[in-house]
Amino acid sequence: MKERLFFHLREVIHLYERTEEGIFSKGRKTKNRRKEVIQSFFDARETKMIKFALEEWSYPGEQRHVFKKVDTLQAEKDRRNERYYPDYDTF
């Protein structure tokens, strides 16, 4: 149990560090850079959890869901109501 807890903790730390490096490496000089890092981290974590749930708890023979990612920053930029890509209302 303890090893599994440490695995999840290491996974979250690694994901945050990758997210932070990705945003800072683009050289983006924005006033809200820290907000971008945090929001991108949350989106990446939520994307991983949704993909896990869709894969792990799907029924045999169930149609695969077309889910790519959660991207709050892009959704705000596009003035979308949903943060999930693709948007299921457009199918």
Image (spheres, rainbow, N blue to C red):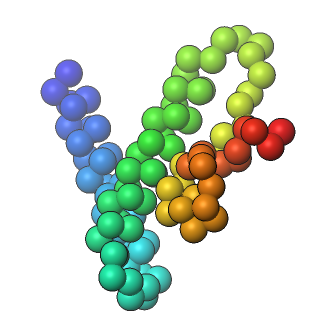
Q: Residue furthest right?
A: 91
Residue at 59% in and 27% down: 54
Vertical arrangement, residue 21 with respect to residue 29, above or below: above
Q: Position of residue 69 (x, y in %)?
A: 58, 48
Q: Residue furthest left?
A: 2
Vertical arrangement, residue 41 with respect to residue 32, above or below: above
Q: Is residue 35 visible?
A: yes
Q: Is residue 69 visible?
A: no
Q: Quadrant of residue 57?
A: top right
Q: Quadrant of residue 24?
A: bottom left
Q: Is residue 82 left or right of residue 87?
A: left
Q: Position of residue 61 (x, y in %)?
A: 77, 13
In this view, the residue in front, 6 or 46, is: 46
Residue at 61% in and 61% down: 79
Residue at 25% in and 29% down: 4
Q: Is residue 33 left or right of residue 54?
A: left
Q: Is residue 3 left or right of residue 54?
A: left
Q: Position of residue 33 (x, y in %)?
A: 34, 76
Q: Residue furthest top?
A: 60
| Quadrant location of the N terminus in the rendered image | top left
Q: Is residue 60 left or right of residue 41?
A: right
| Quadrant location of the C terminus in the rendered image | top right
In this view, the residue in front, 34 or 19, is: 34
